[in-house]
Amino acid sequence: GPAAAERLPACLDAVAKLEAPHGVFAVPGNHDMYEHGAVYRRAVAGTPLRDLTNRAERRTVGGAPLWLAGVDDHWWGTPDQNAALAGV
């Protein structure tokens, strides 16, 4: 709800400071779905985080492919497993 929407930007700012060799990724959860996820999408767009909502990204780790996939929140979002796994 509104309280989560107020806290989300600060949380994402903290997570955005993480560093990982293959990137830092995010997917929304039920508490991120205020305004049907619009608050989450706006907030994550202003960070270096890679949003995996209903999509996947391929990374190469140790010479082998590694796929990371995410889906939207089951209860309040629009989860699409087919879209998330397309091309995997």
Image (tube, rainbow, N blue to C red):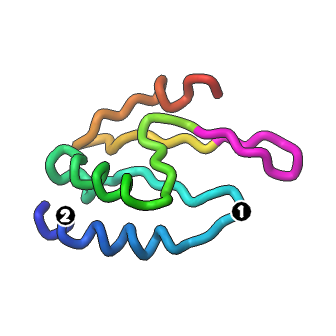
In the image, what residue type sits under mark 1? Answer: Pro
The N terminus, quarter of image:
bottom left
Residue at image position (49%, 35%) is 55
Q: Which residue is mark 1?
A: 21
* Position above or below: 6 against 33: below
Q: Crowdedness of circle 1 by 10 Å Cα count: few (<14), some, many (20+)?
A: few
Secondary structure, mark 1, is: loop
Residue at image position (61%, 40%) is 57
Q: Give the image quarter of residue 24.
A: bottom right
Q: Position of residue 65 (x, y in %)?
A: 78, 40
Q: Which range is magenta?
A: 57-67
* Position above or below: 36 against 21: above
Q: Which residue is mark 2?
A: 5
Tell me if 43 is positioned left or right of 2 in this view. right
Q: Are marks 2 and 1 in contact (CB under 8 Å)?
A: no
Q: Position of residue 11 (x, y in %)?
A: 35, 72
Q: Nearer the viewer, residue 53 or 44?
A: 44
Secondary structure, mark 2, is: helix
The C terminus, quarter of image:
top right
Residue at image position (88%, 45%) is 63
The reply to whether the magenta stretch includes residue 79 is: no
* Position above or below: 20 against 37: below
Residue at image position (66%, 66%) is 20
The reply to whether the magenta stretch includes residue 63 is: yes
2 or 1: tag closer to the N-terminus: 2
Tell me if 61 is positioned left or right of 5 in this view. right
In the image, what residue type sits under mark 2? Answer: Ala
Q: Position of residue 51 (x, y in %)?
A: 45, 48
Residue, far left: 2
Q: Position of residue 10 (x, y in %)?
A: 31, 74
Q: Overall secondary structure of the magenta stretch? A: strand
